[in-house]
Image: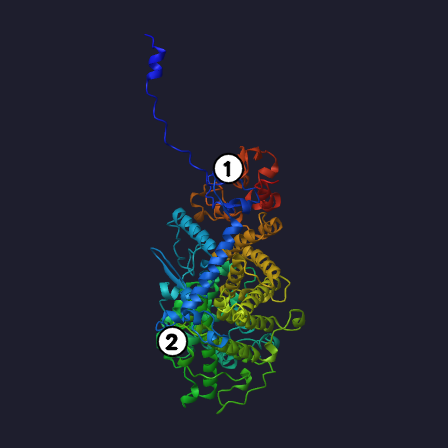
C-alpha cells in the first residue's frame, strides 16, 4: 500500500518540543570532572590548580574580583550599621539617628562595643556538644565562611567514613598484656583505672633508689613547675639550671622526707608516695626529646609513663584526695599536668580535672592569704602562696585553651604574691619571713613572680572579653594599660632578649622569657581582636588603628616565637632539652595567631605589613605540616593556611612551598588495627583524603585509582593523574621508581611532581 504524497503533506505535524537547552553554569573543567563550581571567573577549582577557567558562551559567571569587591563593600556597610545600632539606646527616637552617625571621638569610645559577633562557636553532635568563646582559634576560623564550610564538609565526610572507629582504652598498663598499639589516652581519675589492692602493691612498682634519684634530679632540674634546691644528696644539681623553676614543692623539706622514706618506706603517707610517683612520671615526660610520648606506637618509655600515671591515680584514690591534707594539692597538680602533657591537642578531660583542682585548692583555703590564719607557719604560708600562683596559671591557660572563661576571678582571692626568695632562705624554724631579695637577683621564686604578674593582667583581659555585658572602648584601653604595665614589671633577668644575646643563659631561663612574651601576645590578641575589622564611625578619625596594629603585631610576634621554638628545640638547638615544653598549650596560642593572620589575608584588608604576614604564614604552615602527623589541630591549621595562601597568591599555587612542606611532612605507617577498609595498601595518610587536602581537591576527587595510590601499592596497570586532561594520560611503568614501598616513597617521588602534572598550563 502506497501513501499519496498529498495526504502526507496534509497530516498534522507533531508539536515541537518546548524543552529548551539548559544553560551551562559551570566552567568546562568543573563540568567535565563533575565538580561543584562556584561560577566565579576564575572559579576556585581552576584557581587553585593554576588552570585556565573557560565557560560556555551561554553560561553566566560571577567575576571573582567584582564579587570580592561587593562582599567587602557589603561587609563594611554591615559593620557600620551594627556599630551604629549599638550606639543608639532603645529610648532614643529616630530623629537622633543623624546625630549618632557622626559622633565625636570621646563620645564614641565610651559607647558599648558590639559583642553580637562575640557569642563564640557552638558545635553540636549526637555524642558531643562543644562551645568555645569568640577568642578561641576555632571560633576565629569559623568566622571565615569558606574555611568553615571546608572543614564542615571534611568532618561530615569523616563521620560517614568511620562512624565507629573508636578504639578501646588501654588495659592494664602495669600488667602483663599491655598493648603496644596506639590508643586514645583518657583521664584515669575520671574514667577509672585498675584499683590497688594495698599499699604494698603500689610500692612494689617503685624503681630502684638509684633510678629514682635520677628521676627526682630531672624533676627539680628540668621541670618548670617546682622550686629547686642545691642539695648534697644530688651533687649534679647546679644553680644555673634551677633558678627559673616554679615553686610548688619546698626542696629542702622534700629531701628530708625523701631520705626518711628510703630509710623506712612505711613511714611515708600514701599521698607523699603519690607525689613521688608524679615526680617520676613528669621526669620521664621531660626526658622525651624524640616525641615518643605522642607517637602512634607505644614504646617502653610510654608504657613506663602509663604505669606511673596509674600509680599516681591509685595513690590519690587511696588517700581520699577530696579530703585535702598534706601533699594532696601538690600531687593533684602534678597529675593534672601529666594528663595535660600527654596530649598533643586540647583535651576536655584536663579542663574537668582543672575544675577539681581549683575546688580542692579553695576548699583547703589557698585562695585566702596565710596572714589571716595564725596557725600557719611562715614557711607553710609562703609555699601556699607559690602553690596558689601555680593554680592561677593552670586556670588561666587551660580554660583559655578550651575557649572557656577562667574559673577564678580577681575578686575571689586575696592571696599575696610570693616573695623573691630562694628555698635556702626558708626554714621550718623561722618565725617570720626574711625580706625579699632584689628582683635583679634570679632566685627560685622569680619565675613564678613574673608569671603571676602577667597572668593577673591576662585575667583582667579574660574577664573583660568573656563578659556578656558590653563595655566601651575606654574600658578596653584601660585593660590594655594594665597588660602593658604588667609586661613592664617583669624582673630584669626575665625581660625579652634575642636568642643571640642568650647564648650564656640556661635553657630554662630562655624558655621562661619566651613564655612570658608568649602570654603577653596572647593577651594583646584577646583584647584587640574584636577591633581588627571594626570601622570607625568617623571616616576622618580612625579610633581603632591602635587595636588593629596591636593585634597584628602580637600575632606576628607569636609566630616568630613559634619559629624560634621549632628551630631551637631540634637536636643541637639551645632549647633541645626543653622540647617537651612545647605542648598543646603553646600550640593553642600559635593556632590563634595563625587564624588571626589568615583572617587578615582572607578579608584583604590593607595592612602595612602584608608581605611580612604572608611570609609568617608560609613559615607557620611548614611547621604545622610537620606536626600534623600527631595533631588534628595542626593539620587543620596547615589546611587553612594553604587555602588562604592559594587564594591570595593568584591562580598558580606556591609550588616551592608545597614541595618543601611535603618533603618535611613526617611519614608514618598504619598499624593493623587502624587499616580498616584500606585493604593491603598500608597507607598512613588517612587514605586518599590527605592528598586531597594537600592539593585542595574536593572530597572523592582522588579515588582508589589515583596515581599516588598506585605508586604506593606498586600497581603496574595504566592510570591517569587525577585532574589531568585526556592528553595527560600516563602509562603504567615497570621500572623501580613505580614500584615503591611506603618506606622509600620520599626518596623516589616528589609530590610536587604530581601537582605539576595536575597543572593544565604545563
Q: Which residue appears at 34% of the width and 56% of the height?
A: 127
How many numbered markers are drawn? 2
Q: CA distance from mark 2 to mark 1?
A: 72 Å
Precedes in sequence: disc 2 or disc 1: 1
Can residue 103 be seen at all in this image of the molecule? yes
From the top left corner, tell me how far across and down residue 307 is, in percent.
Answer: 44, 63
161 to the left or right of 566: left
| Image height of 140 relative to 410, above or below | above
Reading the image, the residue beneath label 2 is 360
242 to the left or right of 119: right
Quadrant in the picture for the N terminus: top left
Q: Which residue appears at 53% of the width and 47% of the height?
A: 695
From the top left corner, tell me how far across and down residue 470 is, in percent.
Answer: 41, 72
| Image height of 85 relative to 435, above or below | above
Can residue 629 be seen at all in this image of the molecule? no
Q: At numbered mark 1, what does the secondary structure look like: helix, strand or loop?
A: loop
634 to the left or right of 467: right
From the top left corner, tell me how far across and down residue 31 is, in percent.
Answer: 47, 38
| Image height of 702 relative to 588, above or below | above
Q: Residues within 10 Å of mark 1 (few under 14, many from 20)?
A: few
Quadrant in the picture for residue 492: bottom right
Q: Which residue appears at 54% of the width and 82% of the height?
A: 423
Instruction: Give me the disc on residue 57.
Output: 1
Closest to the camera, between mark 2 and mark 1, is 1
Amino acid at each position: 500500500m502506497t501513501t499519496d504524497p498529498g495526504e502526507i503533506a496534509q497530516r498534522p505535524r507533531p508539536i515541537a518540543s518546548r524543552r529548551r537547552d539548559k544553560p551551562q553554569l559551570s566552567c568546562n573543567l568543573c563540568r567535565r570532572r563533575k565538580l561543584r563550581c562556584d561560577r566565579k571567573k576564575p572559579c576556585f577549582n581552576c584557581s587553585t590548580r593554576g588552570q585556565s577557567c573557560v565557560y560556555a558562551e551561554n553560561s553566566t559567571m560571577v567575576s571573582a574580583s567584582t564579587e570580592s569587591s561587593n562582599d567587602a563593600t557589603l561587609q563594611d556597610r554591615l559593620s557600620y550599621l551594627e556599630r551604629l545600632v549599638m550606639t543608639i539606646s532603645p529610648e532614643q527616637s529616630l530623629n537622633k539617628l543623624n546625630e549618632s552617625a557622626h559622633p565625636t571621638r570621646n563620645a564614641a569610645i565610651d559607647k558599648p562595643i558590639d559583642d553580637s559577633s562575640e557569642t563564640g562557636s557552638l558545635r553540636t553532635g549526637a555524642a558531643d556538644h562543644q562551645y568555645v568563646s569568640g577568642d578561641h582559634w576555632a571560633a576565629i576560623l569559623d568566622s571565615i565562611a569558606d574555611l568553615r564550610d571546608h572543614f564542615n564538609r571534611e568532618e561530615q565526610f569523616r563521620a560517614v567514613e568511620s562512624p565507629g572507629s573508636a578504639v578501646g582504652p588501654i588495659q592494664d598498663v602495669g600488667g602483663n598484656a599491655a598493648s603496644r598499639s596506639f590508643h586514645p589516652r583518657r583521664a584515669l581519675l575520671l574514667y577509672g583505672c585498675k584499683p590497688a589492692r594495698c599499699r604494698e602493691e603500689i610500692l612494689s612498682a617503685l624503681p630502684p633508689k638509684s633510678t629514682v634519684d635520677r628521676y627526682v634530679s630531672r624533676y627539680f632540674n628540668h621541670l618548670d613547675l617546682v622550686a629547686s634546691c642545691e642539695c648534697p644528696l644530688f651533687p649534679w644539681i647546679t644553680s644555673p639550671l634551677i633558678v627559673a623553676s616554679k615553686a610548688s614543692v619546698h626542696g629542702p623539706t622534700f629531701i628530708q622526707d625523701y631520705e626518711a622514706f628510703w630509710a623506712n618506706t612505711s613511714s611515708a603517707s600514701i599521698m607523699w608516695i603519690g607525689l613521688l610517683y608524679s615526680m617520676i612520671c613528669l621526669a620521664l615526660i621531660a626526658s622525651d626529646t624524640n616525641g615518643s610520648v605522642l607517637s602512634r606506637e607505644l614504646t617502653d618509655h610510654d608504657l613506663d609513663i602509663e604505669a606511673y600515671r596509674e600509680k599516681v591515680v591509685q595513690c590519690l584514690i587511696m588517700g581520699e584526695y577530696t579530703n585535702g591534707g598534706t601533699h594532696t594539692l601538690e600531687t593533684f597538680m602534678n597529675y593534672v599536668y601529666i594528663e595535660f602533657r600527654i596530649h598533643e591537642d586540647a583535651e576536655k578531660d584536663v579542663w574537668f580535672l582543672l575544675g577539681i583542682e581549683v575546688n580542692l585548692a579553695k576548699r583547703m583555703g589557698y585562695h585566702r592569704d596565710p596572714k589571716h590564719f595564725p596557725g600557719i607557719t611562715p614557711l607553710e604560708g609562703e609555699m601556699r602562696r607559690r602553690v596558689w600562683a601555680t593554680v592561677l596559671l593552670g586556670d588561666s591557660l587551660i580554660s583559655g585553651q578550651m575557649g572557656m572563661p577562667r574559673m577564678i576571678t580577681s575578686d575571689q582571692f586575696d592571696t599575696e604574691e610570693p616573695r623573691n626568695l630562694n628555698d635556702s632562705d626558708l626554714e621550718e624554724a623561722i618565725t617570720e619571713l626574711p625580706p625579699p631579695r632584689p628582683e635583679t637577683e634570679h632566685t627560685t621564686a622569680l619565675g613564678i613572680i613574673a608569671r603571676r604578674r602577667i597572668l593577673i593582667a591576662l585575667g583582667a583581659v579574660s574577664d573583660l572579653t568573656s563578659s556578656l555585658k558590653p563595655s566601651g572602648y575606654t574600658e578596653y584601653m584601660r585593660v590594655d594599660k594594665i597588660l602593658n604595665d604588667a609586661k613592664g614589671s617583669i624582673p630584669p633577668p626575665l625581660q625579652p632578649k634575642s636568642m643571640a644575646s642568650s647564648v650564656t643563659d640556661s635553657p630554662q631561663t630562655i624558655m621562661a622569657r619566651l613564655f612570658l612574651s608568649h602570654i603577653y601576645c596572647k593577651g594583646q590578641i584577646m583584647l584587640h581582636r574584636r577591633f581588627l575589622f571594626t570601622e570607625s564611625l568617623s571616616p576622618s578619625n580612625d579610633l581603632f588603628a591602635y587595636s588593629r596594629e596591636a593585634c597584628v603585631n602580637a600575632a606576628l610576634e607569636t609566630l616568630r616565637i613559634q619559629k624560634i621554638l621549632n628551630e631551637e628545640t631540634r637536636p643541637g638547638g639551645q632549647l633541645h632539652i626543653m622540647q617537651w615544653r612545647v605542648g598543646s598549650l603553646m600550640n593553642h596560642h600559635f593556632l590563634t595567631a595563625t587564624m588571626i593572620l589568615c583572617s587578615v589575608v582572607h578579608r584583604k584588608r590593607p595592612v602595612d605589613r602584608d608581605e611580612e604576614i604572608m611570609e609568617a604564614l608560609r613559615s607557620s604552615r611548614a611547621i604545622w605540616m610537620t606536626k600534623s602527623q600527631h595533631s588534628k589541630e595542626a593539620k587543620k591549621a596547615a589546611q587553612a593556611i594553604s587555602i588562604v595562601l592559594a587564594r591570595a597568591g593568584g591562580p598558580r599555587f606556591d609550588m616551592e612551598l608545597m614541595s618543601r612542606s611535603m618533603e618535611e611532612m613526617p611519614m608514618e605507617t598504619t598499624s593493623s588495627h587502624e587499616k580498616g577498609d584500606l585493604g593491603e595498601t598500608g597507607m598512613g595518610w588517612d587514605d586518599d583524603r590527605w592528598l586531597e587536602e594537600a592539593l585542595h581537591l574536593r572530597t572523592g576527587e582522588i579515588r582508589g585509582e589515583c596515581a599516588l595510590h598506585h605508586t604506593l601499592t606498586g600497581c603496574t596497570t595504566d592510570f591517569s593523574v587525577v585532574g589531568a586532561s585526556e592528553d595527560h594520560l600516563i602509562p603504567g611503568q615497570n621500572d623501580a621508581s613505580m614500584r615503591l614501598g611506603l618506606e622509600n616513597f620520599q626518596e623516589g617521588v616528589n609530590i610536587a611532581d604530581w601537582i605539576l602534572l595536575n597543572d593544565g598550563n604545563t
